[in-house]
Amino acid sequence: MFNGSEMQVYVVYGGWDYEGADSAGPALFDCKSAAHAAAKRMKEDGNYDWVEVKLQTVHQGSLIAA
């Protein structure tokens, strides 16, 4: 039995060379505008050649009975 909840978050990834190589992140945000602002900073300040923002569902909970 799984007692918990789920929510959607914006996940920001970035990296160099190509997607999946030398990656930075993920960073999680509950606000779309904050996620896109972080992605913009990563692209400008971090000199990443790729940055991606994805909306993902995360599950939070515990398998320990309360």
Image: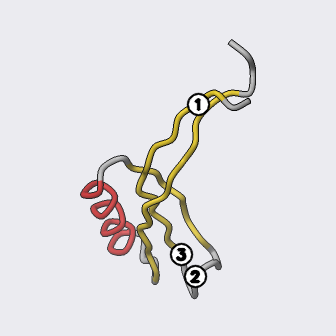
Q: How would you rate the neighbour count of disc 3 (Cα within 10 Å): few for under 14, some for 14-19, many for 20 or more?
A: many
Q: How far apart are labels 3 and 1 at the CA level?
A: 32 Å
How does the figure colour the protein chain or chains? secondary structure
**Which of 13 and 60 lies nearest the eye of the viewer?**
60
Residue at 39% across, 67% down: 42
Does the residue at mark 3 contact the one at mark 1 (Cβ under 8 Å)? no
Between circles 3 and 1, the one closer to the viewer is 1
Residue to which mark 2 is pinned: 19
Q: Residue 53: x, y in percent?
A: 41, 68
Q: How would you rate the neighbour count of disc 2 (Cα within 10 Å): few for under 14, some for 14-19, many for 20 or more?
A: some
Which residue extends farthest front?
1
Residue at 68% across, 27% down: 62
Q: Tag 2, which secondary structure?
A: loop
Query: In the figure, 56 relative to 1: above or below?
Result: below
Disc count in the image? 3
Badge number at residue 4: 1
Which residue extends farthest top?
66
Badge number at residue 15: 3
